Image: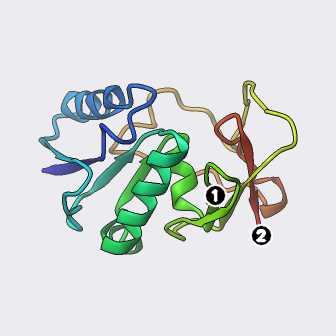
Amino acid sequence: MITLVSIYPTLLGTYGDGGNVMALKHRAELQGLDVEVVTVESGEAVPESGDLYVMGGGEDSAQTAASNALRAGGAVKRAAERGAAVFAICAGYQLLGEYFPDATSTPTPGLGILDVRTDRLPKRAVGELAASCPGPARPGAHGLREPRRCNPPRSRRHTPGNGQGRHRQR
């Protein structure tokens, strides 16, 4: 049984991120795996026992509220430290880092799971990102049973932000 934890889908659901939960559940079931989806709304305790955590995108105030609650509870960080996977989109990804800017551009502490920081650029940066991983490409091999990691050198590990900032390694 895989326990998939959807974290604050109402608070962090700017991009309809509930569809990611449905897609992950469907993909696992196609592989013959049983999946339990646990939905955690804002104000509820996040379980530490999940196998996969999903955090979506949110506006500045929602992102700050989510960060404060998730840091106080500590469950996501402890789950990640024990090896649980975290699938984070947009603001969810920023929450995993050391800090991100709030609505006033003040650095707000993240969960500190990833060694990344989010800063605002002078001009809004929106666009597509293309990335490649070294090694053979194997379509369909990225399911829940056969994950592949891509860890480029630190100097090249950059990811765009939410259109309002950038992520950088320290």
Judge whether residue 78 can be spotted in this image: no
Q: CA distance from mark 1 to mark 2?
A: 13 Å
**Is residue 126 something that shows in the picture?**
yes
Q: What numbered label is drawn on residue 156?
A: none
Question: Quick one: 127 or 44, which is closer to the camera?
Answer: 44
* Viewer-closest of 123 and 94: 123
Quarter holding residue 14: top left
Q: How many residues crowd mark 1 within 10 Å: few (<14), some (14–19), many (20+)?
A: many
Q: Amino acid at mark 1?
A: Phe
What amino acid does circle 2 point to? Arg
In the drawing, does residue 148 fall left or right of residue 80? right
Report the colour scheme: rainbow
Q: Residue at x 35, y 42 (%)?
A: 11
Badge count: 2
Earlier in the chain: of badge 1 and badge 2, it is 1
Q: Quadrant of residue 19?
A: top left
